Image (tube, coloured by chain):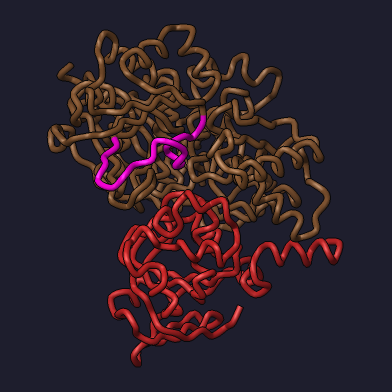
Chain colours: A brown, B red
């Protein structure tokens, strides 16, 4: 019987010739990522009395949530993380200047096709944009992987989603994912591995693929993949340096428990309405909704291309007087590129407030909402109270919809600008 | 892990996410009692204090979805909750619960039958829930998870392994 991508990676990382869905394996990840939660894993390490790591080079630490520190407690937690990094010689360490862990690790060449990566963040699924199996775990389990090098994993069933056609103007992979989440539901792919195929995805940039595998988490996936191709290889050139890797592709006779065929050519810009990501509507159904703040940020949509799309719409415009516009580039590399090309200047000139790269307002760091306020965001979650008051609301959209809406002061169709 | 649990039920709906269980602003804490003070507070007046009157949470589909934050489990433990029964769980919540030694059970059949305040008994080893004269079955835990629950979670398991020089 043939194997899917997830089955092949889990078999390889657990030293088995083959695995089947439902099987529980002891897998050895190539990388275990912890972000601002690192100090918690260090606390567990102290509690259990461990003094040795399995392999410091398989550990990455990135301080991205609530960074730079905003309280003394927070600062002390950062100190604890840095002390751990120094003590154990963790070389893949990125401090508060770097940006969002997921983007930083991919940019720095720590993610290769076929890798198994676990980390203290549900959106580890994003690594599948480069053909790696990424999955979220808790901080205690991170400590366990630090010490033992392994963790138990259940081999998931796989779904195959074939995407056909081209997006029409003003439609992006964010809209596609909101459409899929809306139709399949927040638990439509729980415990499943999702593989994306078809001419649509082949034509999408790596940045757009990152948005896809990131948002796939909001359907409950364990992991999601875009199979590596020439675009993946091109992205990796100069990043992986001399590191060898093996692309993992599904067998032609791999078994999928569900197969979907989606024509994307008729898709419209989509918006996720409060307070669940699955609560999606087409732009026409929500256009005119008043907004107080727009947030261009998060691991879903604060990549260079996302900032550039927003800038292309905002160029020559001022945002609406009643709207606050927060710009949080996903990483330092992204911010530097946006500085060099003028994208950042355009965004700031339009009325935006630039913050340091990182998770920013999506993790409740700045840009907090008061009672009754409404935020339109390019992030991946609109849960009740996630950005402040439990009487505030969050809508999710693409960078293009965000830019058009910032100008008008109400949720607006980017195709009309 | 107690093999038999008994208590009164508080009932939630579908898609209770981990931001609702414990908002991100409290992730600076890892202590069960501190987290419990703010558990479910987004749901408004009466929360979390009224949950302390119950022993077992029952929920619909996809309980614990969203963020992988382990404190969602810690906060529930801090409330004195002994187990969570749901139609289904998000995978990170499921994993974190087992790793924290909190018994969680998928049993969709119970959901429709049970109401707030009802008394239920859970036989964890036997894979049965008893409620109002009825018996509801759930799959028994695989060996690896049973071991973790029995020692009280992954940290306790690691501590014992390190102590024994494994």
Q: Main secondary structure of the magenta part?
A: loop
Q: Residue at x 58, y 33 (%)?
A: A68
Residue A285: which quarter of the image? top left
**Magenta-colored span:** A358-375
- The answer to whether residue A363 is magenta is yes
Nearer to the camera, A250 or B47 = B47
Q: Residue at x 34, y 83 (%)?
A: B117
Q: Check the image and name the residue furthest to the right.
A: B165
Q: Position of residue A77 (x, y in %)?
A: 65, 45
- The answer to whether residue A197 is magenta is no
Q: Residue at x 57, y 23 (%)?
A: A107
Is there any visible trace of residue A46 in the rendered image?
yes
Q: Is residue A392 left or right of residue A112?
A: left
Q: What quarter of the picture does the C terminus of chain B occupy?
A: bottom right
Q: Is residue A68 left or right of residue A403?
A: right
Q: Check the image and name the residue furthest to the bottom.
A: B133
Q: As displayed, is residue B96 above or below residue A253?
A: below
Q: As displayed, is residue B21 above or below residue A300?
A: below
- How many marks do you count on the picture? 0
Nearer to the camera, B44 or A136 = B44
Q: Position of residue A141 (x, y in %)?
A: 64, 54
Nearer to the camera, B76 or A203 = B76
């Amino acid at each position: 019987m043939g194997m899917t991508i997830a089955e092949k990676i889990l078999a390889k990382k657990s030293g088995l010739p083959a695995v089947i869905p439902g099987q529980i394996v002891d897998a050895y990840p190539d990388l275990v990522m912890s972000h601002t939660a690192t100090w918690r894993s260090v606390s567990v390490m102290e509690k259990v009395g461990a003094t040795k790591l399995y392999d410091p080079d398989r550990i990455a630490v990135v301080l991205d949530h609530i960074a730079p520190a905003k309280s003394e407690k927070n600062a002390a937690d950062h100190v604890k993380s840095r002390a751990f990094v120094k003590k154990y010689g963790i070389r893949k360490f990125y401090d508060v200047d770097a940006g969002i862990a997921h983007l930083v690790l991919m940019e720095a060449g720590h993610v290769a096709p076929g890798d198994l990566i676990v980390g203290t963040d549900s959106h580890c699924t994003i690594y599948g944009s480069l053909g790696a199996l990424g999955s979220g775990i808790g901080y205690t389990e991170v400590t366990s992987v630090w010490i033992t090098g392994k963790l138990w994993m259940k081999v998931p069933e796989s779904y195959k989603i074939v995407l056909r056609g081209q997006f029409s103007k003003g439609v992006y992979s964010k809209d596609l994912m909101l459409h899929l989440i809306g139709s399949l539901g927040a638990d439509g792919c729980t415990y499943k591995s999702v593989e994306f195929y078809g001419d649509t995805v082949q034509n999408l940039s790596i940045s757009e693929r990152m948005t896809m595998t990131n948002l796939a988490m909001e359907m409950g996936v364990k992991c999601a993949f875009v199979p590596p191709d020439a675009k993946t290889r091109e992205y990796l050139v100069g990043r992986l340096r001399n590191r060898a890797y093996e692309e993992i592709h599904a067998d032609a006779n791999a078994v999928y428990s569900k197969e979907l065929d989606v024509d994307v050519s008729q898709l419209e810009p989509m918006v996720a309405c409060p307070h669940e990501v699955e609560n999606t509507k087409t732009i026409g159904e929500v256009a005119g909704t008043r907004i107080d703040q727009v947030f261009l940020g998060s691991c879903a949509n604060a990549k260079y291309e996302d900032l550039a799309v927003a800038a292309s719409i905002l160029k020559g415009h001022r945002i609406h007087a009643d709207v606050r516009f927060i710009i949080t580039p996903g990483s330092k590399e992204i911010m530097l590129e946006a500085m060099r090309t003028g994208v950042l200047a355009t965004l700031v000139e339009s009325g935006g407030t630039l913050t340091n790269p990182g998770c920013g307002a999506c993790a409740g760091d700045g840009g907090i909402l008061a009672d009754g306020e409404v935020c339109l965001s390019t992030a991946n979650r609109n849960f009740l109270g996630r950005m402040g008051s439990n009487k505030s609301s969050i809508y999710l959209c693409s960078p293009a919809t965000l830019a058009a809406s910032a100008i008008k002061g109400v949720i607006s169709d980017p195709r009309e600008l | 892990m107690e093999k038999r649990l008994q208590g009164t039920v508080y009932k939630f709906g579908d898609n209770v996410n981990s931001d609702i269980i414990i908002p991100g602003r409290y992730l600076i804490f890892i202590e069960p009692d501190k987290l419990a003070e703010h558990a479910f507070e987004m749901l408004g007046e009466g929360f979390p204090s009224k949950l302390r009157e119950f022993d077992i949470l029952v929920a619909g589909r996809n309980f614990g979805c969203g963020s992988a934050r382990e404190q969602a489990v810690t906060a529930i433990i801090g409330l004195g909750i002994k187990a969570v029964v749901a139609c289904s769980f998000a995978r990170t919540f499921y994993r974190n619960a087992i790793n924290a030694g909190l018994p969680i059970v998928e049993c969709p059949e119970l959901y429709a039958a049970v109401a707030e305040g009802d008394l239920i008994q859970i036989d964890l080893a036997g894979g049965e829930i008893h409620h109002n004269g009825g018996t509801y079955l759930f799959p028994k835990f695989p060996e690896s998870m049973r071991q973790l629950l029995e020692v009280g979670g992954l940290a306790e398991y690691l501590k014992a392994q390190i102590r024994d020089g494994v």
